[in-house]
Amino acid sequence: MMNMIVIKTNNEQYKEFLEKYAPDIEYIMRGLARHYKFRPPKNIIFRPMRKIGSQHFIRCVWANAGWSHGAGYYISLDMESNMPLSRSRILDTIAHEAAHIAEVLTTNECTHGKRWQELYGTAKEILKAQ
Ligand SMILES: [Zn+2]
């Protein structure tokens, strides 16, 4: 099986960190796909969140996910705010973002609405069963 998660960074330290969580994203995505009967994406780009100068584009956001013309499906993490956090806190963020991708795949929307909340809940259960 090809790797679903494609890490995009030139920073070795970031790369090492993202590689630790790539199998968890894949595990959650495949679990969600099985549960909700959709085809998982071939690739998800996993990358540091882009910065504009020294400022984050949206400073209160620690991570985001979705689909873009340039990247396809992607999950971006703000490295400075995420790297010091515990594994369980980061896995929670990853479950949150994976639920956004599943929502895009199944409804073409990206919200924090009812459907997303259900997907996020299922993603957390999938992690617990790991
Ligand atoms: Zn969100």
Image (cartoon, grey):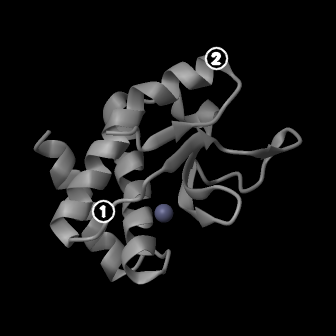
Give the residue at x 72% y 56%. 58
Depth check: give the residue in front, 43 or 55.
43
Depth check: give the residue in front, 118 or 44.
44
Give the residue at x 49% y 50%. 44
- Decide if residue 126 is on the left or right side of residue 77: left
CA gap between label 1 and label 2 equals 30 Å
SS for tag 1?
Answer: helix
> Which residue extends farthest front?
1
* Residue linked to disc 2: 12
> Which residue extends farthest left?
129
* Residue linked to disc 1: 120
Q: Can you say whether 11 is above or below 127 in the image?
A: above
The type of residue carrying mark 2 is Glu
Q: Can you say whether 63 is above or below 11 in the image?
A: below
* Residue 12 x, y percent position in the rendering: 64, 17
- Decide if residue 122 is on the left or right side of residue 104: left
Q: Can you say whether 17 is above or below 60 in the image?
A: above
